[in-house]
Image (cartoon, coloured by chain):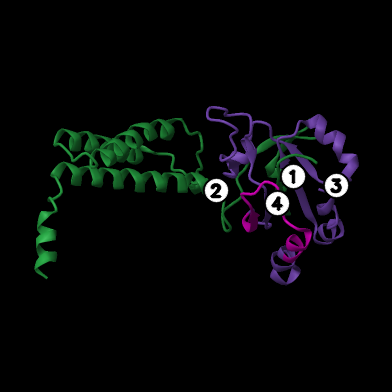
Chain colours: A green, B purple
Amino acid sequence: MEGRGSGRATVKPMKTGTKIALAAAVIAAVTARYWFYLAAEVSLPTDRTGFVIVFLGAAALGVYALIKRTSWLGAIPAVFAIVVGAFLPFTVSVSTQIVERESVIEVGDAMPQFTSIDGQGQAFDSASLNGHLVLIKFFRAHW
Amino acid sequence: MRRLEELRAEFDERGVKVLTVSVDLPEVIADRRHLHGLQATMLSDQQLTVTDKFGLRNQGFHSAPGSEEAEALPVPATLLIDKTGKVVWMDLSPDYQRRSDPSVVLAAMEAHFDIAGD
């Protein structure tokens, strides 16, 4: 018992800077993981301000941790947070994947009115569908 | 499209107007029409204006960041609209290769378009 107690006492308490570095790394990693999850689901939000703020915040926290002085190993999560937090906002801003799910038509909605041209090059007005049962099929291309 | 044509008698029986929307050029539509023989109004929606009205632009298909036009396509979807202009059934898939099977469309028509429900 005594030996275990003294062994524990020899472990240096974690430096404040190291704790901050670990927190920054966790924030950066979790946010990045969530971002890539949304990207895979094709449901990235149109407004990414929150993501940018969190990523930059994680990077700033990593810098702050280094200023507060971390242990030698503690610098690793700090650098990780800075790299991820500083790089991902770039990805977030250039990614063109935008899905406006709210605007997608749903059962119970009124069909939007529209005009277009048909395969003969003739003008088409959706008003001609009024009072009829209609099947509309959207597809990629003929094949 | 040929598969949809299998339901021709079912559409005629119910007086269903069939409309297709794709990004194909009118020339392509005209060219292919005789191949599948589908008696439908086939719209050429190159600018995705109709697609956007329905909110069905598939925004996930960009080949690379910044390529806005290259892969702009509608999400494959089939909708049934009743006589009051209301959407009564819809089948959409984020997988552009998947299509509504004719049997699924027929079941939906039987559920929503049949005289009993009128």
Q: Position of residue B61 (x, y in %)?
A: 60, 38
Q: Amino acid at mark 4?
A: Arg
Q: For the magenta stretch, what is the residue range?
A: B86-107
- State which quadrant residue B114 falls in: bottom right
Identify the residue at image location x=37%, y=33%: A89
- Compared to residue A1, the image places residue B98 above or below, namely above
Task: Give the CA distance from mark 3 to mark 2.
Answer: 27 Å
Residues tagged 3 and 1 counted as in contact (Cβ below 8 A): yes
- The foreground one among A125 and A92 is A92
Q: Mark 4 or 1 closer to N-term?
A: 1
Q: Which residue is mark 1?
A: B20
Q: Mark 3 or 1 closer to N-term?
A: 1
Task: Give the CA distance from mark 3 to mark 4.
Answer: 19 Å
Q: Mark 3 or 4 closer to N-term?
A: 3
Q: Which residue is mark 3?
A: B38
- Compared to residue B116, the image places residue B81 above or below, namely above
Q: Residues within 10 Å of mark 2 (few under 14, many from 20)?
A: some
From this viewpoint, is residue A143 visible?
Answer: yes
- The foreground one among B36 and A19 is A19
Task: Give the CA distance from mark 4 to mark 1.
Answer: 16 Å
Identify the residue at image location x=68%, y=43%: A127
Q: Which residue is mark 2?
A: A104
Chain of the residue under label 3: B
Q: Does the magenta segment cover residue A71?
A: no
Q: Position of residue A51 (x, y in %)?
A: 35, 40
- State which quadrant residue A122 falls in: top right
Q: Residues within 10 Å of mark 3 (few under 14, many from 20)?
A: some
Q: Which residue is mark 4?
A: B98
Q: Residues within 10 Å of mark 1 (few under 14, many from 20)?
A: some
